[in-house]
Amino acid sequence: MKNFVNLIKQDFIQKALKLIEKEMQKAALELPDSVFVEYWGESVPPENRISRWLEIADSLAKNWKPSKCLFLKKITLLSRLRPKDFCRG
């Protein structure tokens, strides 16, 4: 039962983040660098903030990789890779 509950939470988080992708991209480009230095402990150029966020999120997420299901259009355009259909693993 615990695994089922964790899977439901994971799916909810994925869907919630997917719904605010545009807002997150806008914030990444527009927020002052001091915000990222305060929360991430490093300065990141605006054009690299989503990629850096995905690296951090991938390292913290359990049982899924945010980079495999979030910001796929941007990643696909930059790397010319086909997006994965399945986010887990």
Image (cartoon, rainbow, N blue to C red):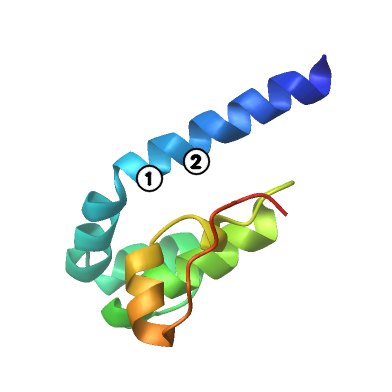
Tell me where residue 85 sits by quadrant.
Answer: bottom right
As drawn, the label of residue 14 is 2
Q: Is residue 8 left or right of residue 15?
A: right
> Residue type at mark 1?
Lys
Q: Residue furthest top?
A: 1
Judge by depth and name the residue closer to the eye, 54 or 78: 78
> Residue type at mark 2?
Gln
Q: Is residue 7 left or right of residue 27?
A: right
Q: Is residue 37 left or right of residue 7?
A: left
Where is mark 1, residue-wise?
A: 18
Q: Residue at x 71, y 19 (%)?
A: 5
| Residue 42 position in % (x across, y down) | 47, 76
Q: Which image quarter is the C terminus in?
A: bottom right
Q: Residue at x 43, y 85 (%)?
A: 79
Q: Residue at x 17, y 66 (%)?
A: 30
Residue 32 seen from this side: yes
Q: Under tag 2, what secondary structure?
A: helix
Instruction: Give the CA distance from mark 2 to mark 1.
Output: 6 Å
Q: Under tag 1, what secondary structure?
A: helix
| Residue 83 position in % (x across, y down) | 48, 66
Q: Dot 2 surroundings within 10 Å: few (below 14), some, or many (20 or more)?
A: some
Q: From what the image shows, is residue 24 above or below residue 81?
A: above
